[in-house]
Amino acid sequence: MVRLRVEFTTEPFDLDRPPRHAVVAREVVQGADLDSVDVGPFGNTAEGRDDAVLAAVGELLRRSIGAGATRISLQVNVVDEAPGATGTPGAGS
């Protein structure tokens, strides 16, 4: 099992108050089984086990689009292999 970090933003932006799609995206990651979540006005990050991050990303995409997002930018990075994990990342382990 590997650890992943996702960084994401939703658009359109509203500098006066967070749009509904941004609030929904943050609620998804804050409610997910992730190790850390950092939300900010111009970007958000979340980190955790690969299965938890990937599940959160799928939910984030579905719910944010449903709440009016017209663009979601995200980047997923492999942080490291989880302690005690065996196998090669991406090889079905």
Image: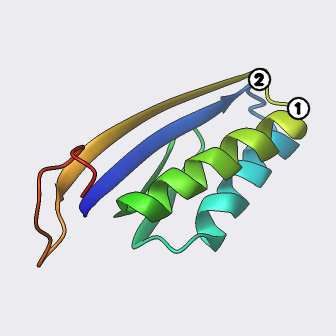
| Drawn side of residue 53 relative to residue 76, left or right | right
Q: Which residue is rendered at x = 49% and y = 51% of the image?
A: 54
Question: In the rendered image, which residue does mark 2 sit on?
Answer: 12
| Drawn side of residue 90 relative to residue 74, left or right | left
Q: Which residue is rendered at x = 58% and y = 34% of the image?
A: 9
Mark 1 element type = loop
Q: Quadrant of residue 55?
A: bottom right
User: Where is residue 6 drawn, in percent x and y?
Assistant: 42, 46
User: Where is residue 8 drawn, in percent x and y?
Assistant: 52, 38
Q: Which residue is rendered at x = 13% and y = 76% of the image?
A: 83
Mark 1 crowdedness (10 Å alpha carbons): few <14, some 14-19, many ≥20: some
Q: Nearer the viewer, residue 11 or 4?
A: 4
Q: Which of 40 and 3 is in front in this view?
A: 3
| Drawn side of residue 49 relative to residue 41, left or right | left
User: Where is residue 35 drawn, in percent x and y?
Assistant: 39, 73
What is the spatial separation of the Cα atoms under label 2 and label 1, in whole angstroms? 9 Å
* Amino acid type assigned to the residue bearing label 1 in the image: Gly
- In the image, residue 24 sits, relative to residue 52, either above or below, namely above
- In the image, residue 31 sits, relative to residue 59, either above or below, namely below
Name the quarter where the C terminus is drawn: bottom left
Mark 2 crowdedness (10 Å alpha carbons): few <14, some 14-19, many ≥20: some
Mark 2 element type = loop
Question: In the rendered image, which residue does mark 1 sit on?
Answer: 68
Q: Quadrant of residue 49?
A: bottom left
Q: Which residue is rendered at x = 66% and y = 56% of the image?
A: 26
Name the quarter where the N terminus is drawn: bottom left
| Drawn side of residue 33 relative to residue 78, left or right | right
Q: Which mark is residue 15?
A: none
| Contact flag, marks 2 and 1 (Cβ < 8 Å) | no
Q: Which of marks 2 and 1 is nearer the N terminus?
A: 2
